Structure formats: C-alpha cells, structure tokens
Image (spheres, rainbow, N blue to C red):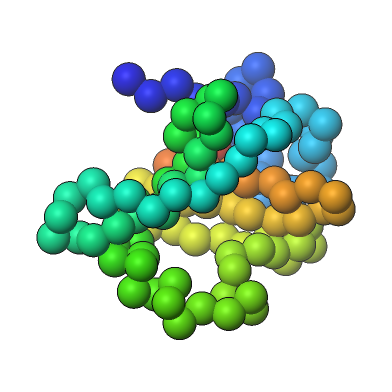
C-alpha cells in the first residue's frame, strides 16, 4: 500500500487548494533528495514520470502521461510544468489531479483525486 505524505494533519480539500493564497506553506514537508525518474510500468504505455525521494519513496506520478520519453525529447525549459501562486500549473485526469507552483525559494506540489464532485482531497 502506498504511504501518503500529508501536508496537514488532514488532507487538503479541493476548496482549500482552490484558495492557494490561504495554504500554510510552512506545513509542506521539505524533500532534500528530490529527483525525477522515468519508469516503464506497463510496456505498451512506455515510460511514466515520477517525482521521487530516496528517503521517502515515490512522491507523485503522472499516471495518464503515457510515453513521456517521446514528449520530453522535444521539450524546452518553457515546457516545464511550473506555475506561480497566482497562476499554478494544474492538470486533471480521471480520478487524479496535480497542482504545482513556485513560491521562492521553493516549489510546491499537491496531488489528489479527481475534482468532478468538488469533494476531492489532496493527500500528497
């Protein structure tokens, strides 16, 4: 079973994440050994992207981004999924969503379930 790294004692709700300005950024864990890995989980879907930590294991993944290795070959720095606190990077797929934003000197990443019912939670 996957361990989640809770941002607060309880996961954040969709409503809290929609109000990024009110998030308690000091409550986010600092990952000193952050790295990015490409891994093949199902051969016919190619590689998938994972944010990982040697000490904490897999942090988040992009489960619906098949064949990421093909896309990354064409990427420039402008393609990196990074937003600001005022305009975060946001992606949503079936039962999964991610929010990424920079607030110097840190980058904050939130991952949770889908938002179709607006009761979704961000557990990582």
Quarter of the image that includes the C terminus: top right
- Residue 36 location (% of width, % of height): 51, 50
Residue 6 sits in which quadrant? Answer: top right
In the figure, is residue 100 to the left or right of 124? Answer: right
- How many marks overall? 0
Depth check: 15 or 65 in front?
65
Q: At x 70% / y 34%, what residue is drawn?
A: 32
Q: Residue 81, image x and y in percent? A: 59, 65
Residue 47 placement: quadrant: bottom left
Query: Can residue 123 be seen at all in this image of the molecule?
Result: no
Judging depth in this view, the residue of 7 and 15 nearest the camera is 7
As displayed, is residue 103 above or below residue 87? above
Q: Position of residue 7 (x, y in %)?
A: 65, 28
Please say whether residue 38 is visible from this viewpoint: yes
Name the outermost residue toward the left.
Answer: 44
- Residue 5 position within the rendered picture, expressed as x and y whole percent measured from the top left: 56, 25
Residue at 44%, 72% in the rendered image: 72
Left or right, 26 with respect to 43, comes to: right
Which residue does the image show at 72% across and 50% down from the upper left? 107
Whether residue 28 is situated above or below residue 62 in the rendered picture: above
Quarter of the image containing the N terminus? top left
Q: Residue furthest right?
A: 104
What's the residue at 53%, 25% (across, down)?
56
């Amino acid at each position: 079973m996957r361990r989640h790294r809770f941002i607060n004692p309880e996961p954040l709700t969709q409503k809290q994440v929609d109000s990024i300005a009110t998030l308690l950024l000091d409550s986010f864990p600092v990952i000193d050994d952050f790295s990015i890995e490409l891994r093949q989980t199902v051969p016919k879907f190619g590689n998938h992207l994972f944010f990982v930590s040697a000490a904490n294991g897999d942090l988040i993944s992009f489960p619906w981004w098949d064949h990421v290795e093909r896309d990354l070959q064409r990427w420039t720095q402008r393609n990196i999924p990074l937003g600001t606190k005022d305009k975060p990077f946001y992606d949503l797929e079936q039962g999964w969503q991610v929010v990424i934003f920079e607030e110097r000197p840190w980058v904050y990443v939130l991952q949770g379930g889908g938002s179709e019912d607006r009761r979704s939670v961000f557990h990582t």
